[in-house]
Image (cartoon, helix red, strand yellow):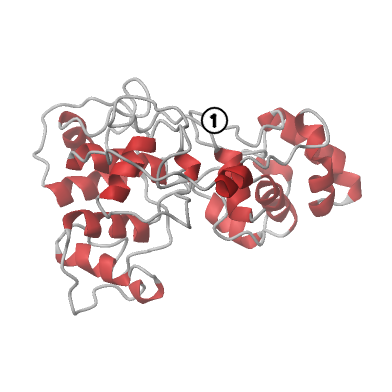
């Protein structure tokens, strides 16, 4: 099984409160649709609507990778396609050339939807936060301002007024009661629901049957050798020195109970070792798993070992659990 498919499997079924589906209903898995990894998800119909509108083609054949964080480059692609923006000839950002979505990045810059992350740069590989997403959507859709202040956790945030405008327009309901979580990253599934609601898109009336072999591959669950964190001992032994394997398993048990799908709803810390989303891309790449989902067990374990043994100033201090 590929790392990407394992990551999709590990993350499957997690319900995130940060973006309720625009469709207003939760479909049952029926083996139909453009993507196997959202079949039966609360975001399934919104993803299908986005696909039918030609705004997304997924992350791989029959896969959407719903729990992957949206990068700034991907956000540009979503918006440029949704708004059918023309591709300009000029170049605004020095780092856009490194991205597959250079044309889309330049398109949203030309449309005054973005000014980049800093002078002359767009930071295409960085994840999009919910606050950034609010500002991008407000500019892209020309959402009118609002006088309200529906959330308590965005006071003083540079995106506060745009967050309020998005809420007033009914495009977002926050991450929990009176909270928006402006610094949390946006997943691909959440972005699908945001855009479907904002653009008033409808899912296709009929969808193709997902090939049985694709479904079987997704259901190829890798069962640990035992319950809880102890079940992951073989993987832990691959990345931790023998004298610290037991300690690593104790920390994992304390942090996640050995559940690779564990996610702290307050901080967003995720996976076996509860890595923080804003640090995950760098840790995963450093551990040799660039682009892996934080819910992929081996990547999460390897990133913990990288953080302890290979990162300057590392060690066990990153975890409260010892």
Above or below, 155 against 220 in this view is above
Which residue lies most toward the right here?
243
**Residue at screen point 47% across, 52% down:** 62
Left or right, residue 141 beside residue 40: left
Above or below, 235 against 167 in this view is below
SS class, disc 1: loop
Q: Quadrant of residue 203?
A: top left
**Residue at screen point 86% across, 45% down:** 244
Q: Quadrant of residue 123?
A: bottom left
**Residue at screen point 66% across, 51% down:** 299
Q: Residue 141: percent from the left, percent from the top?
A: 14, 47
Q: In what quadrant of the picture does the C terminus appear?
A: top right
Q: Residue 22: percent from the left, percent from the top?
A: 28, 32
Which residue lies most toward the left here?
144
- Residue that numbered label 1 is attached to: 264
Whether residue 89 is visible, yes or no, is yes
Q: Quadrant of residue 54?
A: bottom left
The answer to which of 180 and 214 lies nearer the viewer is 214
**Residue at screen point 78% across, 37% down:** 224
Q: Residue 58: percent from the left, percent from the top?
A: 41, 54
Whether residue 67 is visible, yes or no, is no
Q: Residue 82: percent from the left, percent from the top?
A: 21, 53
| Picture mark count | 1
Left or right, residue 127 beside residue 138: right
Left or right, residue 49 beside residue 32: left
Above or below, 169 against 93 in this view is above
The answer to which of 26 and 300 lies nearer the viewer is 26
């Amino acid at each position: 099984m590929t790392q990407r498919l394992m990551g999709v499997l590990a993350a499957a079924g997690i319900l995130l409160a940060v973006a309720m589906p625009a469709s207003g209903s939760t479909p049952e898995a029926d083996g139909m649709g453009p993507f196997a990894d959202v079949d039966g998800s609360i975001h399934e119909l919104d993803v299908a609507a986005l696909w039918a509108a030609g705004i997304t083609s997924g992350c791989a054949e029959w896969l959407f990778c719903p729990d992957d964080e949206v990068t700034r480059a991907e956000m540009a692609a979503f918006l440029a396609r949704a708004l059918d923006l023309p591709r300009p000839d000029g170049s605004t950002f020095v780092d856009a050339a490194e991205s597959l979505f250079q044309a889309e990045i330049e398109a949203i810059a030309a449309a005054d939807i973005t000014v980049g992350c800093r002078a002359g740069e767009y930071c295409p590989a960085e994840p999009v936060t919910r606050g950034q997403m609010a500002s991008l959507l407000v500019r892209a859709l020309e959402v009118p301002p609002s006088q309200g202040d529906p959330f308590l956790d965005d006071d003083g945030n540079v995106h506060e007024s745009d967050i309020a405008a998005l809420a007033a327009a009914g495009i977002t309901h926050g991450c929990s009661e009176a909270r928006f979580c402006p610094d949390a990253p946006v997943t691909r599934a959440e972005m699908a629901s945001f855009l479907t609601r904002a653009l008033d898109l409808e899912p296709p009336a009929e969808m193709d049957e997902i090939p049985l072999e694709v479904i079987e591959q997704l259901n190829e669950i890798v069962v640990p050798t035992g319950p809880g964190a102890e079940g992951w001992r073989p993987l832990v032994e691959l990345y931790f020195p023998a004298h610290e394997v037991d300690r690593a398993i104790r920390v994992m048990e304390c942090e996640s109970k050995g559940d690779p799908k564990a996610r702290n709803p307050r901080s967003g810390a995720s996976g076996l070792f509860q890595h923080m989303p804003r640090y995950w891309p760098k840790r995963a790449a450093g551990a040799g798993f660039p682009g892996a989902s934080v819910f992929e067990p081996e990547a999460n374990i390897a990133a913990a070992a990288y953080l302890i043994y290979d990162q300057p100033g590392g060690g066990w201090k990153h975890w409260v659990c010892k």
